[in-house]
Amino acid sequence: MVVPAGIFGIHSHTASLAVELVLALLAVLWLALVYHTWADARRRIDDGVLVACATLVALFPFIGTLVYTIVRPPEYLEDVRERELEIEAAQARLEQLGVRACPHCDQAVEREFLRCPHCLQKLKDACVNCRKPLEADWRICPYCETERELEPDVSASYRRRRARRDPQQTAVYPPPTDLI
């Protein structure tokens, strides 16, 4: 890149060479910032269109990279994925220990709880025969081998189970208040 010496009012060849070197340095710095913005955006943004937009913004000399630096996502994608894996692993360890969180209020509940003691939400159904807690996808009770009816209408299945029980059991286990 050759800039005419008279363009800046400089007539000395040494001064003109110094100005040309400074301009070349600024051009290289600008291109390095564009590359840095592109590389950083690829590590932080999952969407290719947004990466292209960030790179285009960086084409505005120096200001574009500064704007990108202000509005860029705070974390790298690999850090986000790693944190999610750590959370899943911690939840799996807690699950193995029998500690669970209520899906409604996030308070600690035990595996055997039918209802959350904090928010009173129903967590599991009880077996109609032995009253042990059943997971939602179990078709039989693993404790007493009673077959379970899986129906979308909870109140109808509850009424049928209640009708099958003897009167003493009904008095011991009153129906949940959210179904009546």
Image (spheres, rainbow, N blue to C red):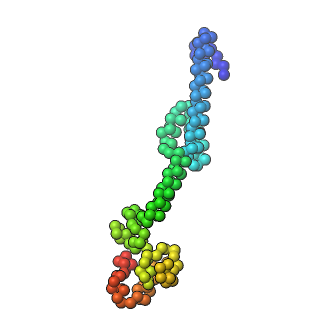
> Which residue is depicted at the point 45% across and 61% down?
94
Q: Quadrant of the N terminus?
A: top right
Q: Position of residue 51 (x, y in %)?
A: 58, 44
Q: Is residue 6 in view from this perspective?
A: no
Tally of numbered discs: 0
Q: Quadrant of the C terminus?
A: bottom left
Q: Is residue 171 above or below residue 26?
A: below
Q: Position of residue 137 (x, y in %)?
A: 51, 74
Place residue 154 in its image quadrant. bottom left
Q: Nearer the viewer, residue 132 or 3?
A: 132
Q: Position of residue 78 (x, y in %)?
A: 55, 48
Place residue 41 in its image quadrant. top right
Residue closest to the far top? 12
Q: Nearer the viewer, residue 123 or 11?
A: 123
Q: Is residue 9 in view from this perspective?
A: yes
Q: Is residue 78 above or below residue 68?
A: below
Q: Is residue 119 above or below residue 161?
A: above
* Left or right of residue 109: residue 21: right
> Which residue is depicted at the point 57% across and 49% down?
46
> Which residue is depicted at the point 50% across and 82% down?
145
Q: Position of residue 124 (x, y in %)?
A: 43, 74
Q: Nearer the viewer, residue 119 or 5?
A: 119
